[in-house]
Amino acid sequence: MGVPKPQMRAAYRILPTLLCELRAAAGLSQRELAGRLRVAQNTVHRMEIGSRRCDAVELIQWARACAADPIEAFKVINARTK
């Protein structure tokens, strides 16, 4: 069966949830956020459902595009993984 993809692990599921929360708090649609990030709307969708990974740099860009503090985003991830 092999090793599951990292984004399929339970601990990783925290990140897609946070991405959705950041976008919703900013009052942005997936399309609007995609425009700010200069990516396709389906990329935003796939990251929010966890079918596409989000690396640290992308999380920083995502938070900034949502007018959120990237450091606070990392703190939320850290707190939720304890």
Image: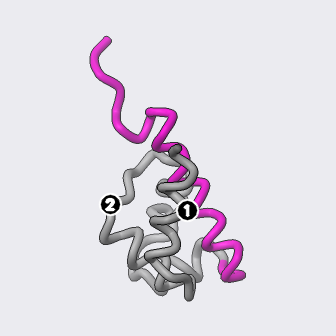
Q: Which of 15 and 41 is in front in this view?
A: 15
Q: Residues within 10 Å of mark 1 (few under 14, many from 20)?
A: some
Q: Which residue is drawn at 66% across and 76% down?
A: 29
Q: Which of 10 and 53 is in front in this view?
A: 10
* Image position of 32 with respect to 78: above or below: below
Mark closer to the chain start, 1 or 2? 2
Judge from the rendering whether residue 20 lies leftward or rightward of residue 9; answer left or right.
right
Image marks 1 and 2: residues in contact by CB distance under 8 Å: no
Q: Which residues are drawn in magenta?
A: 1-28
Q: How many marks?
A: 2
Residue 38 lies in the magenta stretch: no
* Image position of 15 with respect to 12: above or below: below
Name the residue tied to disc 2: 55
Name the residue tied to disc 1: 76
Q: Position of residue 52 (x, y in %)?
A: 40, 51
Is most of the magenta stretch helix, strand or loop? helix
Q: Position of residue 82 (x, y in %)?
A: 52, 44
Judge from the rendering whether residue 56 lies leftward or rightward of residue 63; answer left or right.
left
Residue 11 lies in the magenta stretch: yes
Q: Where is residue 38 in the image (x, y as percent from the top left)?
A: 39, 82
Q: Distance between the residues labelled 1 and 2?
A: 16 Å
Question: Mark 2 is on which residue type?
Answer: Asp
Q: In which quarter of the image is residue 1?
A: top left
Q: Residue at x 66, y 66 (%)?
A: 21
The nearer-to-camera label among 1 and 2 is 1
Q: Residues within 10 Å of mark 2 (few under 14, many from 20)?
A: few
Q: Which residue is drawn at 29% across and 22% down?
A: 3
Q: Where is residue 72 in the image (x, y as percent from the top left)?
A: 51, 74
